[in-house]
Image: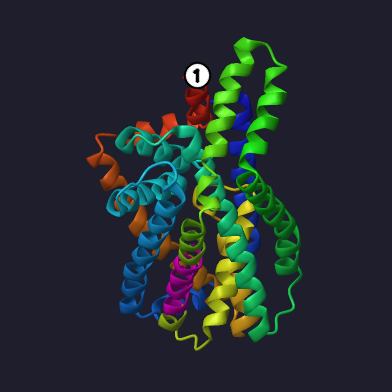
Amino acid sequence: MTARNRSLLFLGLAVSALFLFLAFRGLHPEAFIDSLGAVDPLGLLLGAVVYFGGVVMIAWRWQFLLRSLALVPLAGLARLVCIGYMGNNVYPFRAGEALRIFLLRRNHGVPMAGATTVVIVERVFDGVVMLTFIVVALLFIDVESAEIRAVFSFAAPLFFVALAVFFAAATFHQQARHLAGFILSRLPARLGQPLARLAYGLLDGLAALRSPQNLLGAVVFSYASWMVEALVYWIVLLAFGLEVGYAVALLTVGTVNLAGLIPSSPGQIGVYEFFVSLVVMATASVSQDQALAFAIVVHIVIWLPVTLVGFALLAQQGLGWSAIGRAARDEQAPTQVEAAR
């Protein structure tokens, strides 16, 4: 691990520790335990099962975005999504993304540069969906929270600017290629030629955005997949006996996922608990103890099953824990390897 990565890791752990302190500050242990004991376990089981429906929809979206590069079976993509989630959940630097890009190349022959672009586009789509969830939820519930406003205000410009850049590069594909070629031709051939291949590969990954059918499919399944995840939150809320509307779940999902921009430990520990409990306290009129109990339990519901399934699927690929570590160390490898071809 490089010195830079060690610094980022320690920063993430420190941020997680800070938010854990903020989340647990003032907690009443007895009331917290009573809240945990009152939860309906069947609701938690149902939530865990429903969550995998969202995983399949994420894989379906991925298939639409990859169609310009390769037609990959949905079942194979769903397995890679589980593996990617597992890698992100247990290892820093979002190693799961690099791992699923590597497996997509190894198993299905998808160019790494194009696949990397698609993964970046996915993250931008996710950000736009989260912003939409917050806006829609606030039409139905009245929330006064400086933290939620801060997350929204910080994230909105980032995602909408990135989305505009992607659509511009996809719409004016040839012009973007010419511009990249013009700039890189000024570099020494030893450097410019590999970088040009890399740039063209990245631009090719945006080709799905030029197809109305693929774009519509990606947008529909972006919203559908995250609405299913919001449904999981709602089911767990009901399992806690919290009779709130679905809009609360939308606001919670939108806020906590945008808060993922804050550097933290794998699995967003601390940051997740703080923002989930914050939203639930602000919308469901419950105590900190009950809100934090919900935050911890729903985190387990969306974290543990997919992580266990991801490990099992990784083993089926003939890989183990060390593969996640290699993906983290070589996070930039997919594009570097493609550029060297």
- The residue positioned 63% from the left and 17% from the top of the image is 192
The stretch drawn in magenta includes residue 226: yes
Residue closest to the eye, 42 or 67: 67
- The residue positioned 44% from the left and 75% from the top of the image is 231
Residue closest to the eye, 274 or 91: 91
The stretch drawn in magenta includes residue 277: no
Q: Where is residue 100 in the image (x, y as percent from the top left)?
A: 40, 41
Residue closest to the eye, 122 or 307: 122
Q: In this view, does 197 lie above or below 231?
A: above
Residue lying at the far bottom in this picture: please name it. Answer: 243
- The residue positioned 41% from the left and 38% from the top of the image is 99
Q: Position of residue 70 (x, y in %)?
A: 38, 42
Amino acid on which disc 1 is placed: Ala
Q: Is residue 262 above or below residue 193?
A: below
The range drawn in magenta is 222-236
Left/right placement of residue 105 relative to residue 123 reads left
State the SS at label 1. Answer: helix
Q: Tag 1: Cα neighbours inside 10 Å, few (<14), some, or many (≥20)?
A: few
* Magenta stretch prevailing secondary structure: helix
Left/right placement of residue 181 relative to residue 79 reads right
Q: Position of residue 299 (x, y in %)?
A: 46, 63
Q: In which quarter of the image is residue 11?
A: top right
Q: Where is residue 86 in the image (x, y as percent from the top left)?
A: 39, 48
Q: Quadrant of residue 304?
A: bottom left
Q: Can residue 27 be seen at all in this image of the molecule?
A: no
Q: Name the residue under label 1.
A: 340
